[in-house]
Image: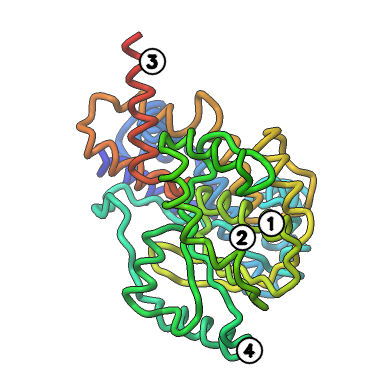
Amino acid sequence: MNNIVQEMINCIEGHLLEGFSLEQLGKEMGYSPYYCSFKFHQMTGMTIKKYMSLRKIYLASWVLKETEEKIIDIAFCYGFSSQESFSRAFKRVFGISPYDYRRSPQPMQTFVKLNLNDERGWFIMDISQKLKIKELQEKIFEQFNQETLNVLNGQMMYEEFAKHQLMGNSDYVPFNEAMCTNPTASPIFSEEFNQIRAAGHQVSLQAYEQMTLNPLKPLWTKDYQCIVLWFGDDMFCQMNLLTMLAFLEQQGYQGKVYFHMVKETTYDVEETELELGGYLEVYQEVFMYHRFPKATLLPVMYQGIQLYFNYLQEENDITTYIKKHLEQPLGDLMKQLFSLFPHYGLGDSQYLKIIEKVKDEYSE
């Protein structure tokens, strides 16, 4: 069945910029339009309409950034009836207008063509871009010398960077958390915060301190002129990034802050200098009150928060897909979840917990 739906995806991709209809897809595939629509949604977790919309918006963002084509021409090229409808759709996805994005391109989460036959399954790192990582690190090291701290998203990234000696002589620490799961508190890393996070992860306070707090010790025991935050573009990473920015703001940090957005499958890196201000309020709005913030955000963080609120729903993209595929062997289901929902950035432990919860609901 994967092969059939992959053929549908290939066909859809070939007609993104042309007139497209379900009838045409059905004719090319040799199935009814209803069957094509049903199977696509069943196997990908989204409708054909949503898939095409996200792909066209993402491709249009690349044209905005890399060319000087008029916005209205880009709108028409990607199937929008007017510049206004394009702007509304663009802002709905990225939280920024096409005009403002072109004037000041900022990191955003990509949406690439789906590949249902990706056999990698569990997360595999590729350090093909390690030279670029070293170049960025060395540039900052030359400017700030030993007074730079690199904060990496998680133990896996930390160990990979250590293995390849990507940080040179600079200090670097992992942020071993999953802020998109379980309750939290403010101030960040307060006694209440630590106790709530430990309880949520079902570990002792001592274990939480050893896993999360002890590695971060340089963050509050040394003075750094520059802090570099190495985080991915998925929801998991963006919620961790928001927490780290809110903490720096909470501490009154006055130095330089850089966000190095890492594509964790290729390790391509995009650098953005950030100004602290408003992140603590956003942290509280998002995590504690579950309200979408009014503040202007990086597009990638805006997307991450949208996904986070979707993730909090009892019925979301992931749970809906799991319910339709509970009969699959666990290993196959996990591979499909990694392949279809990379924008959430969840790990095997999070997916296993969701699968168990869905199973429990069905057994009641």
Q: Give the residue displayed 68% in from the left and 58% down from the top.
A: 298
Q: Residues within 10 Å of mark 1 (few under 14, many from 20)?
A: many
Q: Secondary structure at mark 1?
A: helix
Task: Report the mark closest to the observer, 2 or 1.
Answer: 2
If you read the primary sequence from the N terminus, does the residue marked by circle 1 or circle 4 appear first?
1
Mark 2 to mark 1 CA distance (whole Å): 8 Å
Residues at marks 2 and 1 touching, judged by CB atoms closer than 8 Å? yes
Amino acid bearing label 1? Ala
Looking at the image, residue 40 sits to the left or right of residue 82; the answer is left
Residue that badge 2 annotates: 60
Task: Report the mark closest to the observer, 1 or 3.
Answer: 3
Q: Which residue is at the front of the view, 360 or 252?
A: 252
Mark 1 to mark 4 CA distance (whole Å): 42 Å
Residues at marks 1 and 3 touching, judged by CB atoms closer than 8 Å? no
In the picture as drawn, the residue positioned furthest to the bottom comes out as 142
Q: Secondary structure at mark 4?
A: helix
If you read the primary sequence from the N terminus, does the residue marked by circle 3 or circle 4 appear first?
4
Residue that badge 4 annotates: 143
Mark 2 to mark 4 CA distance (whole Å): 36 Å
Mark 3 to mark 2 CA distance (whole Å): 41 Å
Q: Which residue is at the front of the view, 217 or 24?
A: 217
Residue that badge 3 annotates: 361
Q: Give the residue displayed 35% in from the left and 46% down from the top.
A: 338
If you read the primary sequence from the N terminus, does the residue marked by circle 1 or circle 3 appear first?
1
Mark 3 to mark 4 CA distance (whole Å): 55 Å
The answer to whether residue 53 is above or below residue 364 is below
Residue that badge 1 annotates: 75
Q: Quadrant of residue 355?
A: top left
Q: Secondary structure at mark 3?
A: helix
The answer to whether residue 105 is above or below residue 114 is below
